[in-house]
Amino acid sequence: MKQNSTAAQRVPDPCVLVIFGASGDLTRRKLVPAIWHLQKQGRLPEAFALVGVARREWDDDYFRQQMAEGLAEFVGELDESVLEAFLAKLHYVSGDPANPATYVALKTQLETLDREHGTGGNRCFYCSVPPQIYLGIVEQMGKAGLNHQHRDGQGWCRIIVEKPFGHDFDSAHDLNEALHDVFAEEQIYRIDHYLGKETVQNILVFRLGNSIFEPLWNRRYVDHVQITAAEGVGVEHRAGYYDQSGALRDMIQNHLLQVLCVIAMEPPSSFDAESVRLEKLKVLKAIRPILIGQVDRYAVRGQYGPGIANGEELPGYLEENEVPADSRTETYAALEFTIDNWRWQGVPFYVRTGKRMEKRTSTITIQFSQPPHLIFGQTGKMPPSTLTIRIQPEEGISLSFNGKVPGPDVRLDTVNMDFSYAESFGGRTPEAYETLILDSLLGDATLYSDSDWIEKSWQLLMPVLEAWKTTSSGSVPSYPAGSCGPNEADALLGEDWRTWAAL
Ligand code: BG6
């Protein structure tokens, strides 16, 4: 269970974190830096080791050298003596994840660590490998007996599975089944790094740690909600993956639907995995399915063409390396969701994401309804009061509302109240992976996705994926790189007073 600020810091049991895909980019860029910060803050147990597993024929020394270089690049200046002690906890097993011999070697290494460092048979396995390899790894782990749960004093095993979790409903279901053949659901941690972001976690504190906002959080006061994840970058070096995926699978099925659930869920009775996951699942179940014939009404896609951002000429998606010249993959997607329950009936939730947009920003905008009666002589609509939760960058929350411009006349203008994480709390905001890895070592799955949530989210998006798959389903609108997305997305907002929040 999550603790409040007055609770003592929890430290996990002695354990080993095993990373499959240890020579990959994620390990170097995110995972090992996260472990470093946890170690520095004293959040790891004294008896802790990290074992990297990958095909490359590295040894402990070379792995340590690689990770030290990664830390220098992604963490910055490091205290040499702390670094030495940290690197001593790193080990490497070279082997093909499809080969049973790899698991024999891994098991031997883990038993040695248990004997020499007292890690107690507790292991957390992190699958940071391409999704087509997950099934093989899980099967081999089962065969090698690397799936025990607190039985006979053997310690515990948990598995963290990276996204993408499936490519569609069927593949996600198959992956869940394969995992359940080997692990119990409580042992499985499906990671979604958005849930580890401080601001996303703060949504629940904001809503439920205060009594002033929750009474407004419903159809009586909210006109609509927008959830945006705009990226400045293009497809980068990931065209092989991205062209098969697209924005809907890459961002909406997981990150943005999770955020939507946190915004829309009913207050759970306590902040623990079971209660929180149950409420989030209820939101997905209340979302009105978009039927295949309604996709053009409720969903808009786009693909970036050439454009200019900050004076730099940018190529279009089709000119990027390894992107097929006739690709119809969407790099932008916007959807309207309707939640059929008492709280949200009639309040549209608009969700949008895109690559190569004007700038990088992830925000949630709660736009409040118009006052029921206007007494200040305005005609038409007033600028709406808006609550903006900035997930990144410049994490914070602001409330904009109408105020009186000083002077003899009653003139209104929009003013702002602003909370900034950096100004209020200072210091370094922990990276999502730090929070999530620590939680998995503690056995706290509150911020992880469960199998039902994953399958339901895929099920909701399948009609859209189906409709967009067929080449006869119309052209993919283009938007210039560096812009706010395709113009077609404006029509999604319906009423003419609704506009997309500025990026
Ligand atoms: C990943 C997607 O899950 O999230 C990427 O695969 C995307 O395509 C990234 O760039 C965005 O994460 P963040 O934390 O930068 O918003």
Image (spheres, helix red, strand yellow):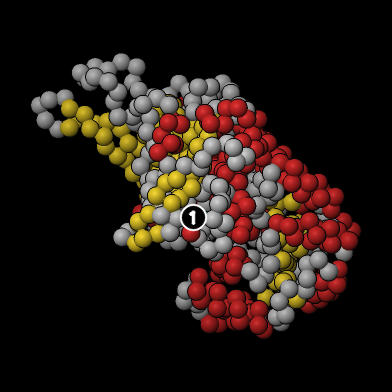
Question: 269 or 200, which lies in front?
Answer: 200
Mark 1 CB within 8 Å of ligand 1 = no
Q: Which residue is mark 1?
A: 317
Which amino acid, mark 1?
A: Tyr
Figure quadrant of residue 82: bottom right
Residue at 61 percent across and 59 percent down: it is: 240
Residue drawn at 48 percent across, 44 percent down = 302
- Near mark 1 (Cα within 10 A), the count class, few <14, some 14-19 or many ≥20, is many
Residue 87 in view (yes/no):
yes
Residue at position x 67%, y 75% from top? 90
**Can you give x and y, in whole percent of width and height, for residue 30 in the image?**
57, 64
x%, y% of residue 43?
A: 60, 63
Task: Work out whether 108 lies above or below 41.
Answer: below
| Residue 320 sits above or below residue 175 on the image | below
Residue 335 percent location from the top left of the image:
52, 35
Depicted 445 relative to depicted 416: above or below: below
Q: Residue furthest left?
A: 408
Q: Is residue 150 visible?
A: no
Side (left or right) of 94 relative to 493:
right
> Residue 259 at what x, y percent from top left?
54, 41
Horizontally, residue 18 falls left or right of residue 395, namely right
For the point 78% across and 77% down, the residue is 116
Which quadrant holds the C terminus? top left
From the viewer's side, name the closer residue of 6 and 482: 482
Which of 208/23 is in front?
A: 23
